[in-house]
Image (spheres, rainbow, N blue to C red):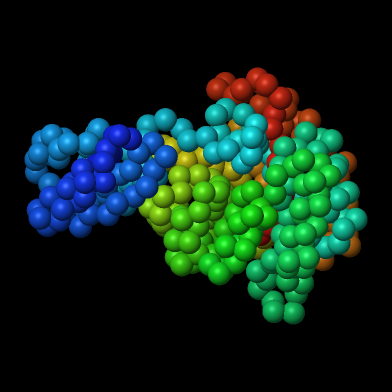
Amino acid sequence: MKRVVVKMRKSATKLEVAQALRLMECRNLEARFVNHPDGCMVVAEGEVRDLSWLEDLAGVEEVVETKSAFPLASLDVRTTPTTVSLAPGVWIGGGEVAVIAGPCAVEDRDQILTTAESVKASGAKALRGGAYKPRTNPYSFQGLGSEGISLLEEARSLTGLPIVTEVMAPEDVEWLLPHVDVFQVGSRNMQNFSLLKTLGRVDKPVLLKRGMMATIDEWLQAAEYVLAGGNSNVILCERGIRCFEKRTRNVLDLSAVPLIKSLSHLPIVVDPSHGTGCRNLVPSMSLAAIAAGADGLIVEVHPNPEKALSDGDQSLTLSEFALLMEAVRQLASVLPGRAKEEVLCSSASVA
């Protein structure tokens, strides 16, 4: 099925946009209006043999025809890589390596503040931790909830690091909006379409983890839900997929990195912690991900992994994280196409 994306000029009036929508629908095209920072777009689906009538409409800047199931995420509509700002001076994409690190879950005040200060000392530019935890077992630690959010805010005040945390339900988005800087969508919620639609209506970055059994196309179509809602600040995260292998928690699909780069303009980060489930594998897979072209990493870090309430086996200690960061800087400095400035780091963790 072919799709047509009509990019409207920033100066286009509401009447001109409405006229484009009406004329498309008159030609049996299913058209949809999409807000965009560079000017609104109209995405239509159906057979179009001649695009000249669209190109001649008032207010139209460009018409793009694509067969992609995820047109807004595709390179057909945007040919330059997207850079997503997490906070002033903190971004993902653009050639630098953004490293996200921190505890799987916010457990108590001392744990999150100690971690935040340590990862900042290692070069961190943002803080992420789980206040709400989707766990396979209903009796496992589910997070501190609103108390965890308050502790994250205290850590932000102490260190200046912006907050990245997971949101689990559409109804949580509104109240979390003033408290967090980046919403994370976990693997289990990748196809929670109500949540994706809600996040499409907010003006904050969304870090979208790949579903544990999702294909690349399913993952990109999930991102399309957020983009179609008008939120262009989407970051993809490869966190491993399920396989028959039992030695590792998941199979980290690093081929997804260059493949995504060939299909989409969206930035992509890699989670070697969930991708392997083994602390000793995290450093090597982190470096491999950067060599493959990832825009960043999400690495779980804990002051005392042996006593962690969740994911201790895959969490680095504070000193191990510092050593990893030095290795990341050294590798990024010699890779072609990487910015030579200081490597960005964001502190975080959430499944």
Is 150 positioned to the left or the right of 15 in the image? right
Q: Nearer the viewer, residue 163 or 346?
A: 163
Is 154 positioned to the left or the right of 6 in the image? right
Point 62% across, 63% down: residue: 175
In this rendering, the count of numbered labels is 0
Point 62% across, 29% down: residue: 96
Point 39% across, 43% down: residue: 36
Percent position of residue 84, x then y: 54, 38
Residue 207 higher or lower than 80, as above or below: below
Q: Residue furthest bottom?
A: 139
Percent position of residue 228, x then y: 38, 52
Percent position of residue 239, x then y: 60, 53
Is 147 positioned to the left or the right of 350 in the image? right
Percent position of residue 331, x then y: 69, 27
Q: Quadrant of the C terminus?
A: bottom right
Residue 219 higher or lower than 195, as above or below: above
Residue 130 higher or lower than 342, as above or below: below
Is 61 positioned to the left or the right of 321 in the image? left
User: Can residue 302 be seen?
Assistant: no
Q: Residue 75 lies in what quarter of the image?
A: top left
User: Can residue 23 be seen?
Assistant: yes
Residue 24 higher or lower than 82, as above or below: below
